[in-house]
Amino acid sequence: MRLVTGIVLGVLVVAGRSRAVAQTEGETAYRKECKSCHGLKGVPPARARDQYKKIKAVGEDGFVTSLSVDSIITILRNGIDKDMKSFKSKLSEDQMRAAAEYILTLAKKEER
């Protein structure tokens, strides 16, 4: 029984650490590639709002929170219109996944 409990606890610790690492990687990727237009906390700065008339805060109108991580990855991979470029040459698939998960956390915090 102790062995099973130890294994379960070990798995939980590793899983928790993996989520924390993914969160950190997502935040790092976001700060490097997204922050200049979308703001540190998901709210675009005035300069970005002036330059990109369609840009919204990540939590605005519930749009981002209605997307799946895979949908956000698709946006990161392909870009949107002419205003948001593709990040496939700048971010790996793992980095895009981590960034997408981080973006969702920003959107959910802002939406409240």
Image (cartoon, rainbow, N blue to C red):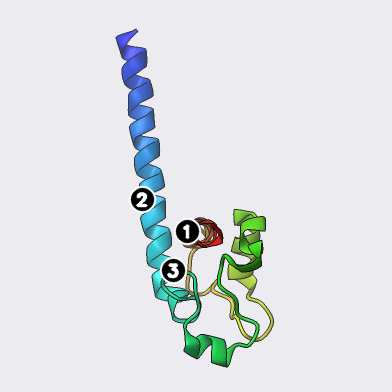
Residue under circle 1?
102
Residue 67 in sight here: no
Q: Position of residue 44 (x, y in %)?
A: 50, 79
Q: Position of residue 19 (x, y in %)?
A: 41, 45
Give the mark nearest the N terminus, 2 or 3. Answer: 2
Of the pair 85 and 41, the residue shown nearer to us: 41
Residue under circle 3?
41
State if disc 3 and disc 1 touch (CB < 8 Å).
no
Q: Residues within 10 Å of mark 2 (few under 14, many from 20)?
A: few
Q: Position of residue 75 (x, y in %)?
A: 63, 68
Tell me the kind of residue under disc 3: Lys
Tell me the kind of residue under disc 2: Val
Q: Which quarter of the rendering shows the N terminus?
A: top left
Give the mark nearest the N terminus, 1 or 3. Answer: 3
Of circles 2 and 1, the one toward us is 1
Q: Quadrant of residue 86?
A: bottom right
Relative to residue 103, is residue 27 drawn left or right? left
Position above or below: 97 against 44: above
Tell me the kind of residue under disc 1: Tyr
Position above or below: 30 against 13: below
Residue under circle 2?
21
Residue 84 in sight here: yes
User: Disc 2 on helix, strand or loop?
Assistant: helix
Q: CA distance from mark 2 to mark 3?
A: 19 Å
Q: Residue at x 41, y 72 (%)?
A: 40
